[in-house]
Amino acid sequence: MTAQNTTQQATPTPTITVDLSPTRTVPRGIGRIPVVKVSPVIEGGAFPAKAVVGELIPIRAKVFREGHDAVNASVILTSPDGVETRVDMSPMQPSGLDPWEAWVRPDAPGPWTFRVEGWSDPWGTWHHNAEAKLPAGVDIELVCLEGRDLLERTAAVADAAGSPIEASILRATAQLLIPQRPALDLLEVANGVGLATAMKKYGPREMVSPTAEFPLFVDRKRAQFSSWYEFFPRSQGATYDATSDTWTSGTFDSSHERLEAAAAMGFDVIYLPPVHPIGTAFKKGKNNTLDATEKDPGSPWAIGNTAGGHDALHPDLGDWDAFDRFVAKAGSLGVEVALDFALQASPDHPWVIEHPEWFTTRLDGTIAYAENPPKKYQDIYPINFDNDRDGIYNEVLRILKLWMAHGVRIFRIDNPHTKPVEFWAWILEQLRETDPDVLFLAEAFTKPEMMHALGKVGFHQSYPYFTWRNSKWELEQYVNELAHEMDSFYRPNFFTNTPDINPTFLQSGNPAAFTIRAILAATLSPTWGVYSGFELFEGEPLRVPGEEFKNSEKYEYRPRDYNAQPNLNMLLGTLNALRTKHAALQQMRQITFHHAPNDSVIAYSKTDAGNTVLVICSLDPFNTAESDVYLDMAALGLPADAQLITLSDELTGAVITWGQRNYVRLHPGSPALILHVLTGN
């Protein structure tokens, strides 16, 4: 029997090939130096964040790394023509949460991008070690050796960049890092101001880790800063014949005077309700009744009859030449015309016959009219956007371009939240590509997510909840939300009132109430507006409780004597002049509320480009309000420990000196202070 060989052969170790090359472009920033939670980024970058030309925009991120070596970060801003600008970020508090921030100011309209680059900071690491080790007498020789090497290498970079002065500073400083010198002298060298400046400019940036490019669309300035005035052309110049009990409508030509008056008050956008033919079926009469006669003008929002639809003018207002004269007159005054665009139809609209598939037919065979229970709009048919999508989309785009060809570059969209968000995204994308100067205001008083979505897909401005925010805590909470949480996608337009909204705060007709709301709207928001009649303290409600006007202009002619006394003409003009004068009032991102113990007194400041305005306003239109006001000096652009501040009262012209704590007494006849910060110490 042959013995078997039990010796086993060794199994060879398999060869494993691994790609050790680092990832150079990481979709959202988890690179060698992690960069996360970048803002402003809208829906992962699907839509661009909002900005306007010259606006200061905050870019924020969380930047960190393993171990204890220093990190740093920069924003790389790329203009529409491809020019990159680096803006270094600063660490923010609380430092343990790794927040970084930089403020950038794009200077041209169009599609921009930005990315955040995290990087290892040898200078920051060395400087931190020097501050820790030199006073303790630890590793002094090594600290000096590493410092000289770092400064010499940076000097070579400065030389190559054509900066011999900074290079000389760096080399001279390197020669001062002698281990035998006293530790405190070495620390003084390390903390030199000139050294820090040169190192910030030319110091090494290692392990640079970029995020993806994120979109930022920069609109023209009026997208953010504007003053709106709304009036009905049919009321302007309308006359009544008592003998025949009939009205003659005002026209575009008779409305030139109102253009001049609004421009004289500093308004730069004139907003018109729909100017199309009005349907006769189910026409609404006075105070929204269903018993209208042929003498009633009907609601302008019941669009369309045999004379045409959205692409036609109401014949009572004038022809296209008259409309063009109106737009030209506005332009000569430095004013733009904003047109109401209501995507709905009266039962008489040509669409009802030509495109019945564009509407919803109920089981009983009738077309569904608009409802907002308990309100009913029998004179309006909503559009069904899921029937003939291409036909509806293209027809809307055609109509918008028609009005654009006649000089309309701003549209106020009626009830956009009752149409698909996808539709608006398409419309806004089409026009951004061909006519990026055209602006859209969303009139969407609805749930927050829908309002947010409309802003995200491209609406340039939106009606906010300001109309219903009256108490101090409501105003502070809501404005902080708008300024610091929604600022990248939602620009508010603080209208004081509208034809649909007669705010409870104004229904007393008390002039102080109108003054207070005008001051708040004009100074809190960079865009604000009033509906005509506000300056005459119109506020009588149809019923209580309720927010409808009695004798609403939506259903009848309402000519007015705008010079009747008393009025707010002078105040409105003053507010608009101050908004033009002060850059601080032309933005919302940099607003701070100051402490006033009395809940009837609100205090806030806004600052931009070295310009700071402080507003202190009563919220009680009936009684005198007294309070101390405690100023946050740092928020006013002054040293935090500043004791005195010089202010100019912009409503009276007086110059006053205040401290950190100040007493104010506001009464209904003079309910606010608007103060320009001059100096402080």
Image (cartoon, grey):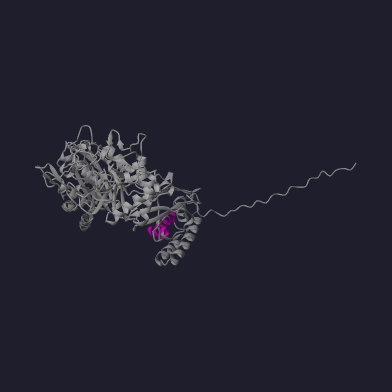
Q: Nearer the viewer, residue 606 or 445?
A: 445
Where residue 612 sits: x, y (%)?
Answer: 26, 50
Q: Is residue 333 magenta?
A: no
Residue 406 lies left or right of residue 129; in this view the side is left
The answer to whether any part of residue 457 appears in the image is no
Position of 671 relative to 143 (above/below) = above
Where residue 512 sits: x, y (%)?
Answer: 17, 40
- The dominant secondary structure in magenta is helix
Q: Is residue 196 magenta?
A: yes
Which image quadrant for residue 1? top right
Residue 420 lies left or right of residue 546; in this view the side is right
> Which range is magenta?
182-200
Position of 203 relative to 385 (above/below) = below
For this orientation, the residue located farthest to the right is 1
| Identity of the residue drawn at 53% across and 53% down | 23
Where residue 114 sits: x, y (%)?
Answer: 41, 54
Which image quadrant for residue 467? top left
